[in-house]
Image (cartoon, rainbow, N blue to C red):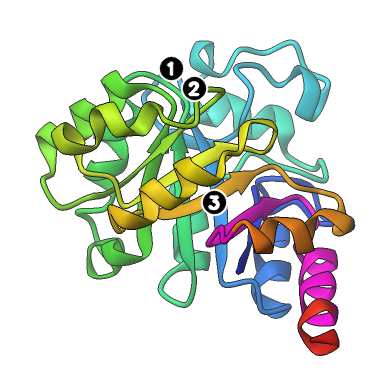
Amino acid sequence: MIIVGNHGATTKKAAHTLAGIREYKENGVVMLTLSVRLTRDKKLVLLSDTTLDRSHNLPLRVKACTLKELQKRTSGSHNPICTLDEALKTILPSSIVIIELKDTGSGLKVLELLTTKPHRDHRDNVMLASSSIRELKRVRGLHKKMKLCMIMKSNPFAFVAWEKAIGFTAVAFHRLHLNNLAISTAHKLDIFTYTYTVNRQSAVNSLARQKLDAIVTDYPLKMLEALTADTKSK
């Protein structure tokens, strides 16, 4: 089972920062997730929320600000706003990244970025994920070979209805709605499976028994330790 780092967050570094991403790589985490938002001037930045309230204690909406405005307001903080371009230059080609598309139209902008140097040579290391079928269909219409992942919130079988039309490389199950039959169905369709977001070390063994391919966690180093300990005990 693969341990996937969530948003570059570590016990020492903030989420969605180059410092966190670098720490992942230094400690052998080879797969991670990032969330992207569009600024007012249509630049891709790393952030999960629509605002900077929770991440920076700033009452700013991402889509209402330009990239320069966001960079200025977060400069000098422990988690300055980072662009997807900067992150990919740090991640690729040594790691695999799952990019969660948070805003309508963000898929198009990611595809455009992936056509530029140096990213176009490493597109096989990138997967685009979303809980929005509309956004995934839009991306598939623009790029027939892009790796896509459906993020499911509750119904673990929802991907089955869309698999033929879209063609998924992966499906992401919410940890509270895991189903062994759904996991088995995905594997029969040759779809990579993972669950999010798992932060208890005690859960690693049971999830491994469910034959998931990976788990997403805020604490990849702790989870790697738990997985290694379980492997050694067998």
Residue at (75% x, 57% y) in the render: 206
How busy is the neighbourhood of tag 2: few (under 14 within 10 Å), some, or many (20 plus)? some
Q: Is residue 167 magenta?
A: no
Give whichever of discs 2 and 1 has the lower sequence position: 1
Nearest the eye: 99 or 207: 207
Give SS at disc 3: strand
Q: Secondary structure under badge 1?
A: loop
Numbered range of the magenta stretch: 211-229
Q: Residue at x 67, y 79 (%)?
A: 28
Q: Residue at x 55, y 46 (%)?
A: 180
Residue topped by disc 2: 66
Q: CA distance from mark 2 to mark 1?
A: 5 Å
Identify residue type, mark 3. Answer: Tyr
Badge 2 vs badge 1, beta-carbon distance below 8 Å: yes
Percent position (x, y) of residue 219? 80, 57
Chain-order first, disc 1 or disc 3 = 1
Q: In this rendering, is residue 123 above or below 158?
A: below
